[in-house]
Image: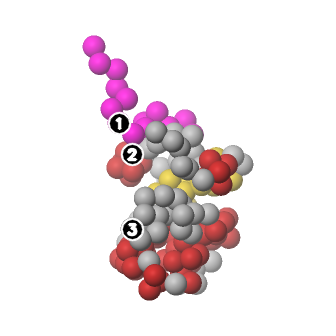
Amino acid sequence: MKDVTPQIIKDVGFDFDWDSKKVWALNEPVIDMLMSELEWHFDIPFWDSEGTDAYNLTPREVMAHPEQEPTHWRMIQESDTSFPIDIMENKERWLILDGLHRCVKEYMAGKKTVKVRKIPRSRIPEILEGDTSVKQ
């Protein structure tokens, strides 16, 4: 099957697939981070446009035209910002593992800081998608 992942996602994204539930289960401290350190995410097409299955929609496009993207708009509005945004250092900057909709909601609310959990790269084996345990 042909890889249709846009080059920008390959350039900024992770080179592994993770399980969000495994990320949520990690015990890492919650700290404040400047929103400006995460705002770059809003210009990358991390999402799929309505009716498609491709990385072709930026969070900033949803903010500008919510009526065109009701699914993501609803997800932003309904996101629970009491949970921190999970991030990991990747290619010399912080990349969101989980919480992009929450981050957008906080940004739209005018927040200058956001609650995050910095997940160390050493925890990657614990969050990989699928069953990575050794069977005997």
- Tell me: 113 left or right of 47: right
Residue situated in front as seen by the camera: 50 or 128 = 50
Asked if residue 128 lies in the magenta stretch, the reply is: yes
Asked if residue 107 lies in the magenta stretch, the reply is: no
**Mark 1 or mark 3, which is nearer to you?**
3
Real-space CA distance between mark 2 and mark 1, rounded to the nearest whole angstrom: 7 Å
Pointer 1: what residue?
130
User: Which three-letter amino acid code belongs to the residue tagged 2?
Assistant: Asp
Pointer 2: what residue?
19
- Quadrant holding the C terminus: top left
Real-space CA distance between mark 1 and mark 3, rounded to the nearest whole angstrom: 27 Å
Percent coordinates x, y for residue 49 in the rendering: 46, 69
x 65%, y 54%: residue = 8
Which label was assigned to residue 51? Answer: 3
User: Which three-letter amino acid code belongs to the residue tagged 3?
Assistant: Gly
- Tell me: 76 left or right of 15: left
Percent coordinates x, y for residue 14 in the rendering: 57, 45
Residue contact at pointers 2 and 1, CB within 8 angstroms: yes
x 56%, y 77%: residue = 61
Residue contact at pointers 2 and 3, CB within 8 angstroms: no
First in sequence: mark 2 or mark 1?
2
The magenta stretch is: 120-136
x 39%, y 39%: residue = 129
